[in-house]
Amino acid sequence: MDLIHPHAKADVVDALAEANAKHERLLVVGGRRHIDKGEPCEVDGELWTTMLDRLVAYDPAEMIAVVEAGMRIGDLNRLLAEGGQEWPSDAPEDATVGGVLAAAASSPRRLKVGPVRDSVLEVEMVSGDGRFVKSGARVVKSVTGYDLHKLVVGSLGTLAVIVQVALKLRPLPKARRTLFAPGWLSAGEELLGAVPGAAGVLATPGGIEVRLEGWPEEVEEQTALAREVAPGLRTEDDARFPAERPWEDAPVVVEAAVPPSALEHLPVVAGERWGALLGVGLMWVGLDEPGEGLRELRARVAELGGVAPAIVGPGGLGAEPVPAAAVHRRLRAAFDPNGVLAPGRFWGGN
Amino acid sequence: MADVEAARRALEEALGPAEVLSDPLALTLYGRDASMVEGGCALVAFPRSLDHIVACVRIAAEHGLTVVPRGAGTGLAGGATPIGDALVVATTKMTRIIGVSPRDRFAWVEPGVVNLDLASALEPHGFTFAPDPSSQQTSSIGGNVSTNAGGPHCLAYGVTSNHVLALDLVLPDGSLERLGSEAPEFAGYDLRAAVVGAEGTLGVVAAVCVRLTPLPRAIRTMLFDFSTVEDCAATVSAIIASGVVPAAVEMMDRGIVVAVENFAHAGYPTDAAAVLIVEVDGSPAAVDAQARVVEEAARANAVRSVRVAADPAERALLWKGRKSAFGAVAQIAPHYHLHDCTVPRMKLVEVLTGVYAIAERYGIVVTQVFHAGDGNLHPLLSFDRRVPGTLERVLLASEEIVRLCVEAGGALSGEHGIGLEKRDFMPLVFSAEDLASQACLRAAFDPEGRMNPHKVLPAGARCGDFAMLRGGDAAEAAANLPEGSWI
């Protein structure tokens, strides 16, 4: 298997030109933290983006950072913290920015910070057939042409190699607190309704975690409101969120996405290792193997109008059809006509 | 060749005779939008249902007409201005709010629902629809989606794309697809995101699933006035740099303040060089904390006075002035041309003063009222196009303004779109390869170029693998462009 380590964006163009000429199939690899998400597929080599890790531009007063796609999340977090800001991915330190985006791996605080796709302002990419393309702009608001940069978020490295991105940032919260309360999903729903502006409400078989962040006075106020419905709650400042992750050490972790109000229909098929983000509609489920349990979960999720790809371990994406299949086919054919970028890895056989 | 008469008969049968217009007055009225470009169309149809939209698209394809989707027609870039043998599909009669799901924090709506009507309908549930373009009393959700509309409150809440979870799209071949999902993730590429802001070139939006934003528990609206534009712009930078993201930061220069005050009587200081409206919202504690930081930033930059809206009525009055600015400038001259560049926020002073200098050189009155917190400028050139030579000067000044913004690292449009007006500026910000790739995205949805041709991409930008049979042909495009579209 070929291993390609581009040191510059131009190297990626060369590598893809060569792969096209040789009819080789490549898997784009960042920090390997999100690499399990995707259908199993055969490739002839890997293209590692980790040497593309430069900071291109960061002025805290613009609240925008421009970085190469191989930058590690930990390095980015430290850089931005010096400016009092964050790009809220909450991904592992050794994950890369490009990997987070290719997998569309949003923060568990997305109730407040939004999905990761909303933070991408500009992308420089190299298409499957080796063309260098820029989309978007380095400003917080732009309706200037078609948003190719939004298409590559969640594309699992199948349309283009993301080589550089401009990210919309947020101020670091001045206070962070987690509230721990006993109870089941219904208790979480009650807290979700009682605490306006929570960053996350997680339900697990062990209880509820409510993440608060913002101004210190604001967090105090939210805590008081939470106590009105959950007098026995325990608080911890600056805790990791989520603190409890019962799904985490399972060989297979599935991320089920359903309309938020449908979450309550999932625990019965999820077993004992799960965590659900209330108000968002995500549930992470830990499984021992991609067998009958996964099939049952996916069937239930499909009935509820959602999807349940495995994000850790084998299990693939599932068999949900893609909408506008012809549009998907044409996009794939236009950006990767020779099938260089991991053919078969994406949804719907793309 | 288009068979307009056959298309008209088929549409009347499918939609009913009352929903199809073909008289010369209607064709003239619907031959333009709120931009300066005048076009023309063959037929206008008013679908009342999703099935009607499908019928419109199929009938147009069958009889050789292109389709131009249209909402309320408030677009400022010519995105809804039809050209040639076009069927205008106006969704203004599809005004139903299909369902509101407070627990899921989404609502399904038809594309013709007016932005402010949606916000009002959500209010009793404790929610709002965050994008609030100045046209919100008139503009429709379908149009908001097509232009990825903004508005003052997008600073904190994000643009329309962030508030659209899913949409039902009638593709150019008449097929219906649901893009995006009521669930937070979905199978496939994010085609929903491609359609939002695509200016009606990828299909007709037939229904939209919008995200509901909880109404803030507390709001504080403040008016600051400054004796120089520089102090005002420096305050904006200072606020952003301080780690506060207000709900809105809007700037108005003296020319606008005077025009608006005559009209809205909001008590704006007409002797100020510039005023800033800053709104912070959230929990009562967060509002206090943010307001403190914002006031400090203003005081550090020589603010002359600070006025805090005492009650909802005063708040509404302060906003009435801002939101009626584009109407109030009719006092200055009968016509205006409005730009929409977004620039890096640290370049505000440089670009604002540059815009004044350009206007002075061409002898044109320019006023500025804009979303300062986002760096989204709206230089407004006022003129009388009946005076010979004036339009030409306005267009030359416009081009210089666009170039100035691009050189500062800006984008051509922050919220109005490219349409016809800004189309030929696209090569200023994108390479030929970038534009060809964008043409590929468009062709993936519309390989035969049936949908809103000539918009967004400059003539000649085409996808190598998918020749756009209609929309991408440079010679045809040039021949079809209406007079007055200088692009």
Image (tube, helix red, strand yellow):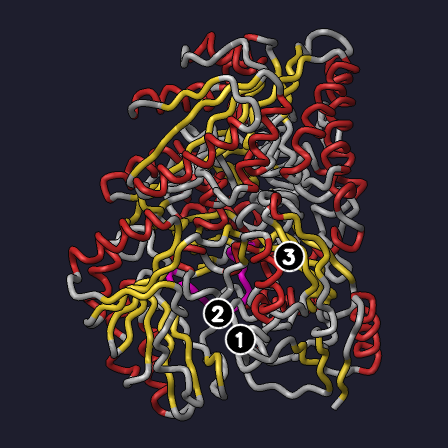
Q: Which residue is mark 2?
A: B187
Q: Nearer the viewer, mark 2 or mark 1?
A: 2
In the foreground, B38 or B65: B38
Q: Which residue is mark 3?
A: A148
* Circle on res. B409: none
Q: Which residue type does callout 3 highlight?
A: Leu
Question: Can residue B443 be spotted in the picture?
Answer: no
Chain letter of the residue carrying label 1? A
Q: Which residue type does callout 2 highlight?
A: Ala
Q: Identify the residue shown where x is 61% and y is 43%.
A: A61
Q: Residue A63 location, x and y as percent? A: 59, 48
Q: Identify the residue shown where x is 67% and y is 66%.
A: A69
Cα gap from disc 3 to disc 2, whole angstroms: 17 Å
Q: Residue B144 location, x and y as percent? A: 48, 40
Chain letter of the residue carrying label 3? A
Q: Tell me whether marks 1 and 3 sit on the same chain.
A: yes
Helix, strand or loop: magenta stretch: loop
Q: Identify the residue shown where x is 72% and y is 78%.
A: A47
Q: Which element is circle 3 on?
A: helix
Determine whether, in the image, residue B196 is placed left or right of residue B403: left
Cα gap from disc 1 to disc 3, whole angstroms: 20 Å
Determine whether, in the image, residue A29 is placed left or right of residue A198: right
Q: Tell me whether marks 3 and 2 sit on the same chain.
A: no
Q: Which element is circle 1 on?
A: helix
Res A268 → quadrant = bottom left
Instruction: Tell me the crowding category of disc 2: few under 14, some 14 to 19, or many 20 or more residues within 10 angstroms, Cα based.
Output: many
Q: Which residue is mark 1?
A: A348
Instruction: Tell me the crowding category of disc 1: few under 14, some 14 to 19, or many 20 or more residues within 10 angstroms, Cα based.
Output: some
